[in-house]
Amino acid sequence: MIRQFDTIAYNNRLRTIRPEQKVIFALILLMMAMIGSWKMQVMMTIWLAAWIIGYARVSWKVYAKTLGVVALFLMVSFPALLVSIDSSFHVSIDRSQIFAAMSLLSRSIAAWSCLFFLLVTTPFPEMLYVLKRMKVPSIIIDLLFFTYRFVFVFEKAAEELYVAMKARNGGSHWRHGGMLVFQLFQKIWHSYEALRLALWARGVSDEIVYVHVETYNEKNKRYLWEAAIGISLLLWLG
């Protein structure tokens, strides 16, 4: 799934828009999602779905599958907000927290929509380049880069180890799962050591340089106007 998102980021229809505009657009909407009302958050989620599916041409199946995973994760956390247990172990539902739980759900999905829009429309190296231009500390950018790098390493290593265990008639006992996790982290540690030695051999000691190539369409300003009008309508209606 991670590799699929990365492929979409390089091949969507909003690829020709400058990354600075997309990052600023997503950050503005993210701040509005944090402080806005639930009506604004719902409208924002629907509007960003139109951007992702309609403008960027991301498959609605990918969007629905990812949204379903996020919604399932949020629903699992609801019992901690709604269910209370007293000293006599009597379980009850606190109805006064239902509105707070729904508000948390709408805010979380709206914030996820902002970040998912950025994920599937902007390649990650371009995000790092924009953060560098925004004078974000280099240590934070480097940490983001290594996290991004090792997400792919983790996914590939887990897939290879799982296939190897199945090919050798690996069982489903919990001990086999523990052995798989141990081998996974061992493989990731070796990958980290190889990357560290490669950077050291190339003389990278203080700061990583990110190469940026201008491949954007300066003439297309329709999306910029639509973004400005949409944000104004959200502020007015919300």
Image (cartoon, rainbow, N blue to C red):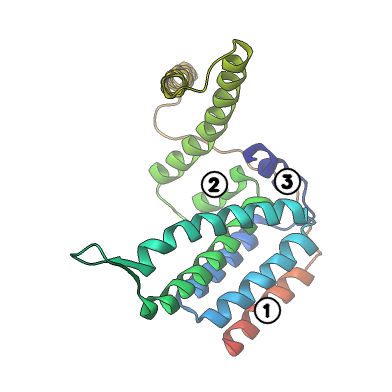
Q: Are marks 2 and 3 in contact (CB under 8 Å)?
A: no
Name which quarter of the figure residue 91 lies in: bottom left
Picture layout, residue 84 above or below residue 174: below
* Residue situated furthest bottom in the rendering: 236
* Amino acid type of the residue tagged 2 in the rendering: Leu
* Residue situated furthest left in the rendering: 87
Q: What residue sits 47% from the left and 75% below the top? A: 103
Q: What residue sits 65% from the left and 40% below the top? A: 1
**Residue annotated with mark 2:** 128
* Amino acid type of the residue tagged 3 in the rendering: Ile
Query: Where is the C terminus found, in terms of image quarters?
Result: bottom right
Q: How many labels does the image show?
A: 3
Q: Which of marks 2 and 1 is nearer the N terminus?
A: 2
**Residue annotated with mark 3:** 8
Residue 112 pos. (x, y %)? 55, 60
Q: Earlier in the sequence, mark 2 or mark 3?
A: 3
Residue 48 visible within the image: yes
Picture layout, residue 42 above or below residue 183: below
Residue 50 pos. (x, y %)? 74, 68
Q: Give the structural element (helix, strand or loop) at label 1.
A: helix
Q: Give the structural element (helix, strand or loop) at label 3.
A: helix
Depth check, mark 2 against mark 1: the one in front is 1
Q: Do the residues labelled 3 and 1 touch (CB within 8 Å)?
A: no
User: Which of 188 and 163 lies nearest the eye of the viewer?
Assistant: 163
**Residue annotated with mark 1:** 230
Q: Residue 141 carries which label?
A: none
In 3D space, how far apart are the residues under numbered discs 3 and 1 (Cα atoms)? 24 Å
Q: What residue sits 41% from the left and 20% below the top? A: 175
Name which quarter of the figure residue 13 lies in: bottom right
User: Which of 14 and 214 lies nearest the eye of the viewer?
Assistant: 14
Q: What residue sits 56% from the left and 75% below the top? A: 41
